[in-house]
Amino acid sequence: MKRELAYLALITLAVCLTASCGVETAEVSLPPESAASHEPDGDLALLYDCAALIGMDDAESAGMLGGGEQNYAAGGEILIGRIYSAELFGEEVAPSTSCGPDGLVDSVSIYLSGTDAAAYAERLCALLGEPTGQSGGVSEGGGSWTEWIIGGARLRLHESLGLCSLEIS
């Protein structure tokens, strides 16, 4: 069971990374803290809503974050999860769920457009308080993470080779 879950997570990650190959990316920085579209209460509410998705089945998760779209693999036979549209830290994001073999959401991923994990960490500290954990520096693969607990779930800010993402599980 754990092996199947690990394989599914690895396949999902590989598909996401492969999908971004060959796509030109631009240097993007975070909007200023005073941007009119940036609403800290909205950011916190979105993060809590994403944490609430953990453990839901597809029917339940369809009622969250505007419903989103189902995401299938294997020619429409295997439900990966849902992809939503939202705003976080003043930028448009697409929170996506991954379901385990039992059909329940086991993680939510949010890819961020900024390249400065420290700026995101500062905003998360302002919303959630001090981190509950951190990686012991940069890994061999060039990545690091900082962790908070939100709504009974683990939220990790990942930074690897200039790419930032949030993972809630």
Image (cartoon, rainbow, N blue to C red):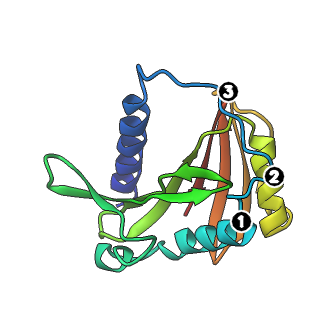
Residue for point 81% across, 52% down: 33
Mark sitting on residue 140: 3
Residue type (three-letter) at the residue carrying disc 1 = Glu
Q: How many marks?
A: 3
The crowd level at tag 1 (other Cα within 10 Å; few <14, some 14-19, many 20+) is: some
Residue for point 38% across, 74% down: 61
Look at the picture and state if 98 lies above or below 62.
above
Cα–Cα gap, marks 1 and 3: 36 Å
Residue 75 location (% of width, % of height): 13, 47
Residue type (three-letter) at the residue carrying disc 3 = Glu
Cα–Cα gap, marks 3 and 2: 33 Å
Residue tagged 1:
39
Of callouts 2 and 1, the N-terminal one: 2
The foreground one among 105 and 141 is 105
Quarter where residue 124 is shown: bottom right
Assign a secondary structure to mark 1. Answer: loop
Quarter where residue 106 is shown: bottom left
Assign a secondary structure to mark 2. Answer: loop
The foreground one among 12 and 26 is 26
Residue tagged 2:
33
- Dots 3, 2 in contact, CB < 8 A: no
- From the viewer's perspective, tell me whether residue 1 is left or right of residue 24: left
Residue 104 location (% of width, % of height): 36, 71
